[in-house]
Amino acid sequence: MARSFYELVDININHKKCELIVINPSLPRPFLSVSLGTHEQDTIHPIQTEARYLGVWISPKNTRSLTKQCLRRTRNEFLHTIRHKKLSIAHVVYLINKVLYPKLIYLSQLTTFTKPEWDAIERPILALVKHTIGVQRSCPTSALYHEGIVGLYCLWMVVSTAGIMNLCTVLNDHNDATFTTLLRLRQAQLLMKLPDCCFSVHLCFRSLYMAASRSNLALFHLLLASDLHVNIKLDQIDRLSFSIKNIEFPLLDIWSKSYNAASITRINNKHSQFPLVDLSQLIAGDRSSLMIWKQYRTLAGLSRKGPKAKWFTQLERSVLESSDSRYLLPEYRSTQSTFYITRFLTPPSQDGHQKEWVAVQLDTAWLIGRITNKCFNGCKGLYAIDLYRAVYDNHSCNCSFVNDKDTHTIVRSKNSLIMFQLNVTFSNVQETPYWIIHSPL
């Protein structure tokens, strides 16, 4: 893309003054090379130390520790600059509140730090202010925060306010940042095994939030807002989209008896395509036995090789009748209806090979039909439809079973039909073929 731009505007680049950033290269090291402009290929060498690009620090090491080092370095440089200046206390407080603190907030806006960590960063700043006004180090810090005495901002409150306000701003927008933030919150909810919306922070789950928020910035600020008695809520529609329905045996209730919060968030491999929330997800088709470890690995899209995980062994001890049986304890046997994984028919095709399913009203009754033939005589369209008279409604799974043999054909004008696409699958119920209509009339 860059080379096309350079050719478009007819310019050359100086490769010696260019910097290249490569994130997670997938090629072997001998093939890591790039050609900048007309220059021959340059080999890409991974950096071993941090690099600054457009004010952003990039490092192959731990970003959290690197950010903390940058905060300390910025603080020390600022304090060294004003320490030996003849400044009034009002001037010093103004520079700290309006210059130093915004810079620290900018550097830490993508990293989570706890209150003790921010207190450690703030401690030399408080010592300088106390030295400037000529009081002892044992002077209460609250006197410095009082706007009628010194008026110094509390660094922890400044950082917390900025993070919460940024979260509210992002959630109320309608852009890519809003979408990714909501995805991160959904990911955190699955990580914590919570069936209800994660925006409602309950005291009994606070340890779970703390464990999951270490690597989730949005959840960290959501928990911080709850601690400061700031409630961030979704509207009813968005709240329902965060709730997981039909939870019968929450796994969180089972694992809370054996694991702490940090261990619960680590259960279920991060590469798994099958996040676990309910025990019913691990119950076999007979609704009374637990699936084996290899079956779960297959559902999760993981390799079937390797030993059984400790969390799965502990789960077996908690829910099975005995160690040599796969049958669940009576209180864990599911009573929900079995939902089969089926493949829906393709939508109607433009070439006419795939016909529509229709709902037809005859007298006062609604019948389900399948178009078998279309013919056009002049400007009038006639449809031949196979109507299915034997329809059995199943309200528990919101579908209808249609016997494929009990049919009669009618011919109706196109204008007299009410037509819409239905999700239909074919199944065998007690060795009898049936069409299953999943969309209600």
Image: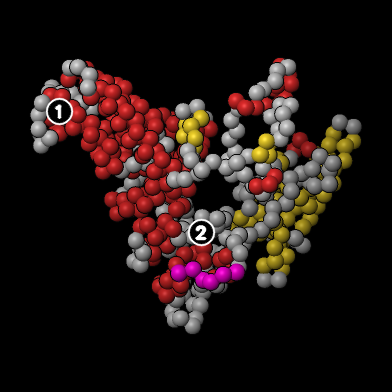
Side of 430 where 129 appears, left or right: left
Q: Amino acid at mark 1?
A: His
Q: Nearer the viewer, residue 24 or 290?
A: 24
Disc 2 marks which residue?
269
Tell me where residue 31 sits by quadrant. top right
Spatial CA span between label 2 and label 1: 52 Å
The percent position of residue 64, horizontal first and vertical second, equals 40, 43
Element assignment for label 1: helix
Side of 33 where 219 appears, left or right: left
Q: Give the residue furthest to the right.
A: 378
Q: Residue at x 49, y 77 (%)?
A: 327
Other residues around mark 1 within 10 Å, as few (<14) / some (14–19) / many (≥20): some
Name above or below for residue 74 compared with residue 342: above
The percent position of residue 74, horizontal first and vertical second, equals 34, 30
Q: Nearer the viewer, residue 76 or 190?
A: 76
Mark 2 or 1, closer to the camera: 1
The percent position of residue 385, horizontal first and vertical second, equals 79, 48
Q: Main secondary structure of the magenta part?
A: loop
Q: Amino acid at mark 2?
A: Asn
Side of 26 where 284 appears, left or right: left
Q: Residue at x 86, y 31 (%)?
A: 379
Disc 1 marks which residue?
131
Q: Residue at x 23, y 34 (%)?
A: 124
Name above or below for residue 188 compared with residue 121: below
Q: Residue at x 47, y 43 (%)?
A: 184
Q: Which segment is the magenta one?
A: 305-310
The percent position of residue 181, horizontal first and vertical second, equals 47, 38
Taking the image as drawn, is residue 394 in sight? yes
Q: Nearer the viewer, residue 123 or 388?
A: 123
